[in-house]
Amino acid sequence: MDSSPKPKILYIEDTESARTLVRRLLGRDYVVLEAEDPIAGIELAQDTHPDLVLLDINLPHLSGREVATRLKSILPDASLVALTADATQGAREMALAAGCIGYITKPIDVDTFPRQVQEFLGGKQEVLENPDEHLQAYRAELVEHLEAKVRELTEAIQRNEFLNRQNQHIIAMLERRQHLLEAAARVSHGITSILDLDTLLHSTVDILCDEFSLYYSGIFLVSDDGEWAVLRAGYGEAGKHMVATNFRLHVDRHSMIGACILEKKPRIALDVEGEPSHFRNPLLPETRSEAALPLIVQDEVLGALTVQNAQLNAFSEDDVTALQSMADQIAIAINNARLLRQLEAANAELLRTKTFEAIATATGEAIHWVGNKAAPIPGSAQRVREDLLTLLAASQRLYEHARAASGKPPFAAVWENLAEEAAEQGVVLSPRAEQLASQPERRQRVLLSLESMLEDLFIIENSANTILNIKEDLIGPARRREEAPLNLETLLGDVVREMGLPPGVVQMAVQSGLPSAFGDERQIRRVFVNLIKNAWEALEGSDQPQIRIFAQRAAEPGYVDVVVADNGPGIPPEIQERIWVSFFTTKGDRGGTGLGLPACMQIITQSKGKLWVESEPGNGAAFHVQLPAASGE
């Protein structure tokens, strides 16, 4: 096997199909290098020193002949062959004069092309007759091409000079616009934090004159009847005087202020002497230019802003754009101040209404809940009392029979003490004993049952414990907290194991590198016990119950998120807000107190976190717990 390296052939051609054909014909026997433009081809030749260079004549920017001349100047020993479709008279001679050793015409003959390449690699050179004549013609072509390039460069320089002047003009305009926008931004920043309307208006005219170097500015607001534009704030002593004298203008086209309010668009007077609608105010004698800008919010005109300058032609198109943008901000600030007044009054009324409603709702829910839990107690207690009296009556008859038969029976003192206490309580046992004795033995067994007595006692005990257990839900969140860093992976794993749910129900994932949360371990554990317990209860009757727990970094820096989700029936939208209300429960007679989720919300809120639910009916529920991360993690 021949281990010598394959010859390198560089093909400079801007047509992809031609390069592909040459690559297929020569790729097996040669290393074929390709360049799609002249400059890249020259650079590639310098880097690789190919054994043969194939050149197209009609290349962009530089002709193949010019490329050949350049390659010969940097690689004198390079073998160059023109491969072109140019069959015009003199084309071959010009290529040879430029430095090529051969000339192959297109279309390529696939049968002879590899042999032709091999011959040129083997040293074949085509002979140029009358070389001086063709060399002179080629040089003339180079000079002509150079002249064309010089003309192109000259035109490009002229275009660049024109563009440079245009750019300088644009830059100056942009700098001016930037200055205006920065000034407008400072004005907006200065007014957006002011919520008192009178303070806002007076501060605005002062800031405007300072930032835009204005002679005067003033703010008019439309009167309630829409007939007048009333000056509410003005700059300087002139402005103070006009406000004090209740200066106002009709909303009509006889003034720039009235016209801009009616038309809802700016009115500009670059020379007020030629503007008929300009109001000639004796208090402002130096005004030469004026702009009146409407104050509009959601198509409602609140008033107008007047800005005046002591210079002619003071307001350019960019000035008007910036001033109108700022006027829009002023309008929003004025509207916000108005709305704040209305909102404060409405909020006070709403707060009173909602407070009474919340108290009524919570009290009603609490009374209803306690009533439901306590309802079984009186009936069960009454049945236990009746069973106890029946048992005492039966015991009395047994005592009497035993005493008649043997004198003083065992435990006589116990019974005699019970009989005395019954008498003191006004309990008469004899009639009940006689009634019991009159019953058949089978009936007697039914009238007195230990199982029935224990069942009633269990009902009483369970109801009482349920009522007592709400104590922890009510005061648990108020316990003194002992906050510390919490490893959520450990805490959640312990909670799941301790709850003893069936294998495979809970799927838990914790993001790698999750920082510790910060909170009270006992209370945070209680939150997750409650959420997982609720999720499990929501899955009752499900064929494939599944609870997913995922802990990760929160999108908000400094927090971690834990999601407890199930594939149960979900929570209807209409009760998603009510689940956080004390004593509200969807568990009916299944033992829910309606205090678990409110307690969870209070615990998480006290921990400076957030708790919310996302649910769609039929797609389960996902409870999100956001907790602060431990500092330094």
Image (cartoon, grey):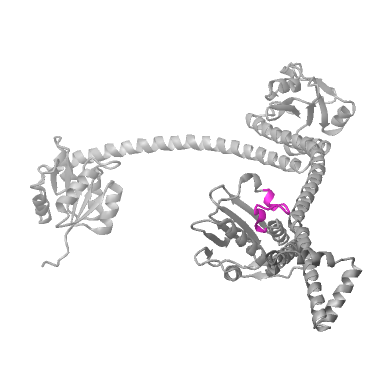
For image coordinates 14% across by 37% down, the residue present is: 87
The image quadrant where one finds the N terminus is: bottom left
Q: Most prominent secondary structure in the magenta stretch?
A: loop
Residue toward you, 302 or 609: 609
For image coordinates 53% across by 50% down, the residue present is: 619
**Magenta part of the protein: which range?**
577-591
Can see residue 231? yes
Residue toward you, 445 or 630: 445
Number of numbered labels in the structure image: 0
- Within the magenta stretch, is there residue 573? no
Residue 314 x, y percent position in the rendering = 69, 29
The image quadrant where one finds the C terminus is: bottom right
Q: Residue furthest right?
A: 424
Q: Residue furthest front?
A: 405
- Within the magenta stretch, is there residue 584? yes
For image coordinates 59% across by 38% down, the residue present is: 174
Residue 40 x, y percent position in the rendering = 30, 50
Which of the 4 image quadrants contains residue 522?
A: bottom right
